[in-house]
């Protein structure tokens, strides 16, 4: 007998087609048969060792988080309910050009400090890998959900060039191309960049184009956090479209938002730019989260020149009064490139986490609120936090626009990505709520997307971008990475005040045919593994 039959489910299969009622049979981690309208047809109903009554529940493919920052969380937290409870069965790691492979000892130390605000300092993780392949092997020891990996361009540049703001030499360029090729050969699905983060932002377009040509040769895709989501957003999007056109490389735009006051109501301009490229034959997709605030590190707002040389040099410059004043001027008057060319508004910068517990009182307040309580300028407070927490503070940046969020999520190449930073006392609620928030708020309550369309955005479409031939659809022969949810009650529990609250209305989640969420509770199953790039 088969392992499991899910009876009388309303199947939403991930293609965007209308739902249908069926029994779905699972065995050996795969869907072995789908019997539509079994009860009404009066046929012999499939039997299995276990039968699950899914009356009133939707059965869909597991959700694919196209932009995740769980690179260390998956290793340190076997439970990982932040994602498993949402119905996420696959996360894409290595985002924004900074992660933990490929590295050497020197590069690893700097990267750990640079992204401590995203992932924590990592003192509780045994960094027993250096290459992409070794990191994926580490994931294969057993994790809560599956994970794919993007080669991080900033980390590659740090390894081959360092943290200097200069063009790469021909030898360094060759070394970066070799590192990207090796990462793809070892199973990475593409390349990411963080072009407002050092050292990735120091790369010129010609350098990036060369790396994208390598990615294209291996059948991967390029996923840039591009050079501006603010004053130069449309130009930055156009730059990425043209760059990947020249490289003949598929493009996936990370957290494709239009933020800050200069971009209010301008999502249609972005979508027109993308439609023109798509109609001309470009291969483009994008991801977004269904919230208006962004989330990053406080250090990310600094001007690029302040980051040259790496985290230690940033701290040295912040400690020097004259240099710190230059940084302040760039932030508050000029508009630093790290802050997307827009002068910082300290009322929009909320501290969401710190790595130094002594600074916990700053969490949950904007920089200006904390400055007022201390009787000092906002820059003095921000500088203090950066120095005393060694660049560790994480922030929510309240600069988004709801009309832009809604317009972009309707687009024909849209997918879902949480951009979920799990670090900090008050993380962005998107880390725990993105996927049920799509289903509860934007499908059931607002009707922005139909249920079938939304599920396709979260499953089949991202699986196609990742070139996964047996995931992302409810189809015979596909892997049984599945979620059952109640469309009447599914909702994000996480809020800005209680961001770690788990969702409601998602009683069952399966990874490789095994329950990781059962009756709404996390099991001890670790069925997730590294999902490697399919050969060209």
Image (cartoon, rainbow, N blue to C red):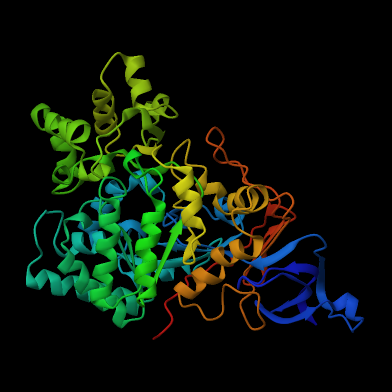
Confirm whether residue 368 shows in the render.
yes
Q: Foreground residue, 128 or 505? A: 505
| Residue at image point 68% right, 68% down | 12
Q: Hey, which residue is sitting farthest bottom in the picture?
A: 536
Counting every numbered tag in the picture gives 0
Q: Foreground residue, 355 or 367? A: 367
Q: Is residue 499 left or right of residue 44?
A: left
Q: Is residue 282 left or right of residue 446?
A: left
Q: Which x, y percent locates residue 506?
A: 69, 54
Confirm whether residue 128 shows in the render.
no
Residue 390 occupies quadrant? top left
Q: Which x, y percent locates residue 138?
A: 43, 66
Looking at the image, residue 265 lies above or below residue 250: above
Looking at the image, residue 143 lies above or below residue 470: above
| Residue at image point 20% right, 41% down | 336
Looking at the image, residue 316 lies above or below residue 515: above
| Residue at image point 33% right, 81% down | 218
Q: Which x, y percent locates residue 476?
A: 67, 82
Q: Which x, y percent locates residue 184?
A: 33, 76
- Quarter of the image with the N terminus is bottom right
Q: Is residue 147 left or right of residue 318?
A: right
């Amino acid at each position: 007998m088969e392992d499991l039959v899910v009876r009388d489910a309303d199947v939403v299969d991930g293609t965007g087609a209308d739902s249908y009622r069926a029994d779905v049979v699972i065995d050996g981690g795969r869907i072995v048969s789908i019997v539509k309208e079994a009860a009404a047809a009066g046929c012999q109903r499939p039997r299995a060792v276990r039968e699950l009554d899914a009356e009133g529940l939707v059965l869909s493919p597991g959700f694919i988080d196209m932009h995740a920052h769980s690179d260390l969380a998956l290793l340190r937290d076997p439970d990982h309910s932040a994602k498993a409870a949402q119905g996420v069965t696959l996360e894409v790691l290595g985002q924004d050009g900074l992660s933990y492979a490929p590295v050497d000892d020197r590069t690893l130390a700097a990267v750990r400090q640079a992204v401590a605000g995203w992932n924590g300092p990592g003192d509780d993780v045994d960094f027993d890998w250096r290459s992409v392949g070794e990191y994926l092997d580490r994931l294969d020891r057993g994790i809560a959900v599956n994970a794919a990996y993007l080669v991080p361009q900033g980390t590659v540049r740090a390894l081959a060039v360092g943290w200097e703001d200069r063009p790469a030499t021909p030898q360094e360029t060759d070394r970066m191309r070799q590192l990207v090729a090796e990462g793809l050969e070892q199973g990475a699905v593409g390349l990411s960049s963080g072009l407002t983060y050092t050292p990735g932002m120091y790369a010129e377009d010609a350098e990036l184009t060369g790396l994208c040509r390598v990615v294209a040769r291996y059948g991967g895709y390029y996923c840039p956090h591009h050079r501006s989501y603010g004053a130069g957003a449309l130009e930055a999007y156009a730059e990425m479209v043209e760059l990947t056109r020249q490289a003949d490389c598929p493009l996936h735009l990370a957290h494709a938002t239009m933020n800050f006051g200069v971009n209010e109501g301008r999502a249609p301009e972005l979508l027109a730019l993308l439609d023109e490229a798509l109609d001309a034959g470009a291969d483009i997709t994008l991801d977004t989260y269904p919230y208006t605030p962004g989330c990053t590190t406080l250090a990310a707002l600094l001007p690029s020149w302040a980051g040259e040389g790496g985290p230690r040099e940033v701290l040295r410059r912040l400690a020097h009064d004259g240099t710190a004043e230059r940084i302040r001027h760039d932030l508050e008057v000029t508009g630093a490139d790290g802050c997307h060319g827009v002068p910082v508004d300290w009322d929009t910068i909320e501290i969401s986490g710190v790595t130094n517990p002594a600074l916990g009182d700053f969490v949950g307040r904007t920089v200006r609120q904390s400055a007022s309580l201390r009787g000092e300028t906002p820059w003095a407070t921000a500088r203090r936090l950066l120095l005393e927490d060694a660049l560790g503070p994480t922030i929510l940046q309240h600069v988004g626009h709801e009309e832009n969020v809604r317009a972009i999520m309707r687009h024909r190449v849209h997918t879902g990505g949480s951009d979920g930073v799990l670090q900090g006392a008050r993380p962005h609620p998107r880390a725990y709520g993105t996927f049920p928030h799509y289903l509860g708020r934007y499908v059931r309550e607002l009707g922005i997307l139909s249920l079938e369309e939304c599920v396709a955005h979260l499953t089949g479409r991202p699986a196609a971008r990742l070139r996964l031939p047996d995931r992302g659809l409810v189809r015979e022969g596909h892997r049984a990475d599945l979620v059952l949810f109640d469309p009447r009650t599914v909702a994000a529990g996480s809020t800005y005040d209680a961001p770690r609250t788990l969702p409601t209305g998602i009683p069952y989640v399966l990874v490789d045919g095994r329950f990781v969420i059962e009756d709404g509770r996390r099991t001890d199953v670790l069925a997730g593994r590294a999902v490697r790039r399919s050969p060209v």
